[in-house]
Image: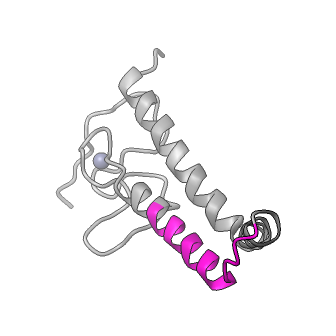
Amino acid sequence: MPGNPALETAWRDLNRRSAILWLLFFGCIPGMFLLTYLLNDVLLQEAPFFVVALAWMGAIAWAGSRMASFACPRCNRAFFENWYFFKPLRRNCAHCSLTRSARAMPPPAATGY
Ligand SMILES: [Zn+2]
């Protein structure tokens, strides 16, 4: 089955966004200590730990919002959000149920339920 280039571009973009988010998320503790160490001991910047932690939280929020703003390639609405949920682990679109990493774009399933 030939892939759909627009879809592949969209999934690649999504994978990059989610990789950044999970990297920041799971790298949070070691990353913050490493950054504090680099700033204070290597660059002699006297950066308090909480400033680094705050910046890290900001980075996670930024990555999260980038992920949340990913638009579904089929219905062009926010893939991970409906009106009150943001689920970064979901495997299909919140609006049209398009499966993540789908190779082809099936017509929208009945959404009138
Ligand atoms: Zn969709």
Q: Residue at x 28, y 55 (%)?
A: 95
Relative image position of residue 37 (x, y in whole percent): 80, 70
Relative image position of residue 9 (x, y in whole percent): 43, 29
Majority SS type along the magenta span: helix
Q: How many marks?
A: 0
Q: Is residue 37 left or right of residue 112?
A: right
Report the residue that reaches farthest toward the left: 112
Q: Quadrant of the C terminus?
A: bottom left
Q: Residue at x 77, y 64 (%)?
A: 38
Q: Which color scheme is applied?
A: one colour
In the rendered image, the vertical position of residue 85 relative to residue 113, given as above or below: below
- Magenta-highlighted residues: 44-62
Relative image position of residue 78 (x, y in whole percent): 30, 55
Q: Residue at x 54, y 43 (%)?
A: 16
In the rendered image, the vertical position of residue 5 relative to residue 23, given as above or below: above
Q: Residue at x 75, y 63 (%)?
A: 43
Relative image position of residue 75 (x, y in whole percent): 24, 44
The residue closer to the viewer here, 53 or 2, is: 53
